[in-house]
């Protein structure tokens, strides 16, 4: 969208690269965040975010429309809402600031009308009663009654850092009751079969645990390798 335009310092608006096949996104919607994280080395994921939609079964899974804003200012989030397609996840680097809310109930109404897939906000939100009806997933750093400014600057569809996550526009963002994770778009297709195999292994272990047939050797071998006489 920027083309050959000259932007003022601190501003840019780009189009989201759409590398992810909708069918691939749909298949990932059944993968828990914890499983995706296990398959990516158990060291990735957002830190310090809370789900405010009061529905443990409501999650999000979709391409990241990234926004970087000045703490306490939501001008570019409003613009991102107008650019977003159904199912897009608006991921905001608000610097972790909690002094002013970046989104609230009125923006939530717009997001519902436009069928946005959800929000991930490294910052604050407000109007908690409205979010708590469980219709629109939102993960945020915190909340406050204090509203935002609408002055800028800010950037849309650029690489951002959000609560410890490195997110590129168009990456796959997933969130559930356990947390939020980002899967690079270029890795998503290869990760899916690993995640599905991981789910099958966990299901087998779960059945074994339920029937009391767990093999103690599974962990005894690990302990012996560490020098324990078991």
Image (cartoon, rainbow, N blue to C red):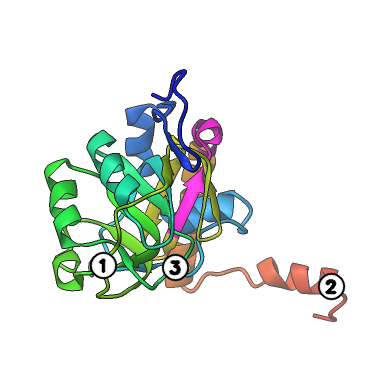
Residue 78 falls left or right of residue 180:
left
- What residue did someone put label 1 on? 147
Callout 2: SS: loop
Residue toward you, 50 or 122: 122
Q: Which mark is residue 97?
A: 3
Residue toward you, 113 or 214: 113
Q: CA distance from mark 2 to mark 1?
A: 55 Å
Q: Are marks 2 and 1 in contact (CB under 8 Å)?
A: no
Q: Is residue 123 above or below residue 229?
A: above
Callout 1: SS: loop
- Of badges 2 and 3, the one in the foreground is 3
Q: Is residue 209 magenta?
A: no
The image quadrant where one finds the N terminus is: top left
Q: Is residue 183 magenta?
A: yes
Which comes sooner in the sequence, label 3 or label 1?
A: 3
Q: Which residues are magenta?
A: 180-191
Crowding at mark 2 (Cα within 10 Å: few <14, some 14-19, many 20+): few
Q: Is residue 18 above or below residue 127?
A: above
Residue farthest toward the right in the current orientation of the protein: 227
Which comes sooner in the sequence, label 2 or label 1?
A: 1
Please name the residue shown 27% across and 34% down the image.
Answer: 83
């Amino acid at each position: 969208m920027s083309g050959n335009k000259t932007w003022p310092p601190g501003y840019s608006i780009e189009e989201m690269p759409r590398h992810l096949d909708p069918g691939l996104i749909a298949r990932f919607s059944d993968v828990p965040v914890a499983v995706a994280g296990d398959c990516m080395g158990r060291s990735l994921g957002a830190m310090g975010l809370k789900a405010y939609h009061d529905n443990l079964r409501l999650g999000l899974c979709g391409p990241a429309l990234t926004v970087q804003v000045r703490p306490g200012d939501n001008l570019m989030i409003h613009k991102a809402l107008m650019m977003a397609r159904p199912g897009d996840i608006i991921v905001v680097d608000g610097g972790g600031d909690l002094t002013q809310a970046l989104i609230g109930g009125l923006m939530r109404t717009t997001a519902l009308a436009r069928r946005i897939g959800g929000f991930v906000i490294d910052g604050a939100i407000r109007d908690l009663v409205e979010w708590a009806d469980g219709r629109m997933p939102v993960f945020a750093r915190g909340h406050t009654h204090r509203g935002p400014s609408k002055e800028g600057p800010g950037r849309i569809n650029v690489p951002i850092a959000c609560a410890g996550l490195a997110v590129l526009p168009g990456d796959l963002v997933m969130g559930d009751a356990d947390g939020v994770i980002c899967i690079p778009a270029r890795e998503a297709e290869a990760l899916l079969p690993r995640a599905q195999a991981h789910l099958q292994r966990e299901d087998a272990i779960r059945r074994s645990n339920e029937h009391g047939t767990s093999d103690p050797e599974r962990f005894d071998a690990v302990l012996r390798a560490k020098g324990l006489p078991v």
